[in-house]
Image (cartoon, grey):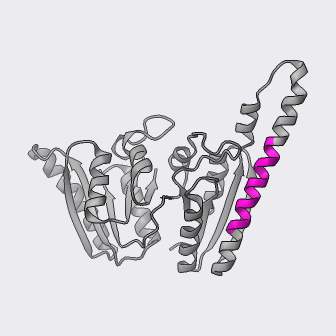
Amino acid sequence: MINRILVALDLDIDTPLAMRFAIKLAKKFEASVSGLAVVDTVNIAAQVGGGAIGTIYYAEELRKHMTEDSRKEAARLLDTFEEMADKAGVKHSQLMEEGVPYERIIEDLKYHDLLVIGRESHFFFNRPKKDTDTLADIVKKSTAPTLVVNESDQDIKRVVVAHDGSNASARSLQWFVQLEPFGKNLEMDIVHVCDLDNETTVDKSKLLLHLASDYLKAHGYKNIRENLLDKGNTGDKIIGHVKDTGADLVIMGAHSMNAIRRLTFGSTTHELVKNSPVPLFLSN
């Protein structure tokens, strides 16, 4: 059950969709939704940098100017969010905070059930195209699941569960079942990538699929399929299955399938975040 939703606001192209997605969920559950815009004062200070004594004054003036510009952009986003929430008739609040974006988002997420965020989020308003590790840091360190949205806005009817048996994969599935963000009348495709020529591997993979399927059945899900995908690039395999089946959402663990190796996303999760045609439901 979802009672409080947090939506992270940024200048990326996916933020309007994230707002609509979060507000739609809030209306469905009669939940409240919080719009959060973070002014990245740390990144601004790093961009301005230091210098000789004669340049300190100008650096400080530039920092103030960049910070004020970021506050104005954040306020504009919050106004847009408030207008959308008012129009939908959902309970809402607006939050503008300053500091390191992922730290502020994670702190607020402690008191929300779900985070909705655009996949292109960078949270540096002065340079909105600047790559940051914000999304990866949020998913790795948060205490609640994250719904990463993109340009796709269709209703969720068919879900791909990318299950590898890891703790992260299991937690994502558990969060999804407990929150029921899209109800239970869903087509659930549980997939696992393995070497189909290796009989031992296939047997182990089938067991993982059965365990996940039994878990879903125990919680009232009925339309469940189990699918083994042949070895290869895991991200490509999952995306291909999504396209082939017309799925609307992927559930996976952010640490699954060697997903996070460094401070940023690793191969599989990175590829899905960047290239998945549908939203992702992630947990650490």
Q: Is residue 78 above or below residue 12?
A: below
User: Can residue 110 be spotted in the picture?
Assistant: no
User: Can residue 226 be spotted in the picture?
Assistant: yes
Q: Nearer the viewer, residue 55 or 191?
A: 55
Instruction: Identify the residue at image location x=34%, y=49%.
Output: 166
Percent from the top left, x then y, of residue 281?
A: 44, 59
Q: Is residue 50 above or below residue 45?
A: above
Q: Is residue 110 above or below residue 44?
A: below
Q: Is 172 left or right of 130, judged from the image as shown?
A: left
**Extreme residue toward the top, this view:** 52
Instruction: Identify the residue at image location x=53%, y=58%.
Output: 144
Percent from the top left, x then y, of residue 215?
A: 30, 66
Q: Is 54 left or right of 145, judged from the image as shown?
A: right
Q: Is residue 33 above or below residue 171?
A: below
Percent from the top left, x then y, of residue 186?
A: 33, 74
Instruction: Identify the residue at image location x=70%, y=51%.
Output: 38
Q: Nearer the viewer, residue 83 or 192?
A: 83
Percent from the top left, x then y, of residue 29?
A: 54, 78
Q: Which residues are magenta?
A: 66-81
- Which corner quadrant of the image does residue 55 belong to? top right
Instruction: Identify the residue at image location x=72%, y=32%.
Output: 47
| Residue 68 on the magenta span | yes
The majority secondary structure of the magenta stretch comes to helix
- Which corner quadrant of the image does residue 74 belong to? bottom right
